[in-house]
Image (spheres, rainbow, N blue to C red):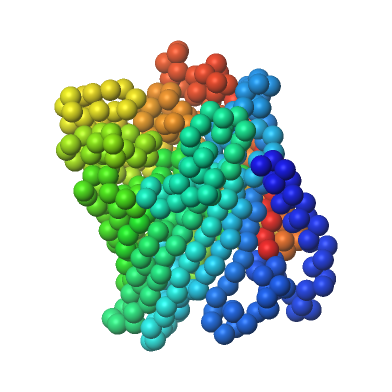
Amino acid sequence: MRTFNVVVAGFVLLGFPLSPLLAANEPEHGEGTLFKSLFGDSLEKNYGITVSSLIDMGYSRNNTSTHEERESGFSNLPVLWYSDEGFELATSHLFIDKKLKSTMIPRITPLPGPKPEEFSFGFSAELVYGRNPQFGRTFGWDMNWGPNAANDKDLDKTRRDKKNYLAMTNMFGQVYVPYGPGFNVIAGVFGTAIGYEIPPNVRASRNQFATKTYAFASDPGTFTGVMAGTRVMNNDNGILGVELGVVRGWNNMQDNNDDQSITGALRWRSSDMKAWVDYEFVAGNEQNKSFARGQFPSARIVSPDGQLKQQHSLNGWYAFDDKWSMGAELTYGRQSGDGKNTTVDIVTGPGFDGAKWYGANAVISYQYQPDLSFSVRAERFSDPDAFILFPASAAKGTYKALTAGLRWDLNKYISIRPEIRSDWFDGNDDQRPFGNGRETKQVTSTVEALFYF
């Protein structure tokens, strides 16, 4: 598998010098150029369908792990996205999209401008391969696809060999209905868009860093269900969108508790789109009804009775001027537990009586020049019951992190994002989440390369 990763990297790097052979009127960005160079642009011109790719790979080291731990994988945990040391193919993506002409981009933002008066249909598909899809799969959908089933048979060997996984994190249809204020409806499997950081690392994303926040680790990855949205305000006071959906639960297509969850969002944008505030949530019973139908570790509780799980995120962004901007997030979550002997936590045992988690993070960015920006991020995240960060960590306490990095766009195909990150932990004396349970502090350095084609 490592040989495959190196081949992928070499193919991409060797391909970029061929860019002058593409069409003379090249787009500003590299997304979609490989497909168009091979098959032409008729699919986009005639049907509005775009095909593009992204490879997210990098190299990481920390100051706590031993050589043996480094070679065995996941030695950066509980730091996520780049959890391995050494070379890692974090994700490689294939995107196939047909966008809506609508008053909103579903799960992302309401839009300014007049309301479209015609029906619009679209879809989105995202196939992902790499290390990170191990944690981004959906029960009842891509959990056992391709290499996944074989990898899951021996998780220790998979970790040591740093095996890759396959997932399809988006596969949904969408429609815009021009009645009233105009409505969007999406149905299928889709990324949740809860929280400030939203994967993947597409060019327009809010993700300034290679590694993710602990708040990101606490969010659900995918939903399966239906979500509707509409723009309810568009004037000098700003733009307001509302979304509401019914879904199967966290990372879930199959039924594990005979219940549904509710998800939704309020999304406000300033009229000049230089500021925004989002409130997003999901709430519903997430317990497994039995061990035989268990969806571990996404749902850690087994109980014959409903046990409510909820996650809330209040996040926003503001551009001070053309150079300086700031984003921030407050997050809160809770897994309820009735304390009965029949309510079992797979880690702590019977009598589970609830857990909570909460945190805050902020990032400041400076756009030094069009192709170069610098960012600093600070976070404090409390997991006092060691619940939501499991299995990345089983330590009870508060995590703090400070990350500094930059983004350098070498050309329209390649972006480089080096960072240095310092993490430390406050908990009981025996709670040490870093260095395989030896340390309360860790410094991680990562160099990430993003290839858009």
**Vertical comparison of 408 with 294: above or below:** below
**Quadrant housing the N terminus:** top right
Q: Residue at 33% of width from left, 74% of height from top?
A: 183
Left or right placement of residue 364 versus residue 242 in this view: right
Asked whether residue 12 is in view, the answer is: yes
View extreme (top): residue: 429
Q: Residue at 45% of width from left, 78% of height from top?
A: 101
Left or right placement of residue 296 versus residue 436 in this view: left
Q: Position of residue 225 (x, y in %)?
A: 32, 60
Q: Position of residue 120 (x, y in %)?
A: 41, 80
**Quadrant housing the C terminus:** bottom right
Left or right placement of residue 99 versus residue 311 in this view: right
Left or right placement of residue 75 versus residue 172 in this view: right
Asked whether residue 212 is in view, the answer is: no
**Vertical comparison of 286 with 66: above or below:** below
**Vertical comparison of 81 with 45: above or below:** above
**Along the line of sight, which residue is nearer the eye, 359 or 42?**
42
Q: Residue at 74% of width from left, 56% of height from top?
A: 12
Q: Residue at 59% of width from left, 69% of height from top?
A: 51
Q: How many marks?
A: 0
Q: Position of residue 123 (x, y in %)?
A: 45, 70
**Vertical comparison of 358 with 350: above or below:** below
Q: Position of residue 77 (x, y in %)?
A: 54, 30
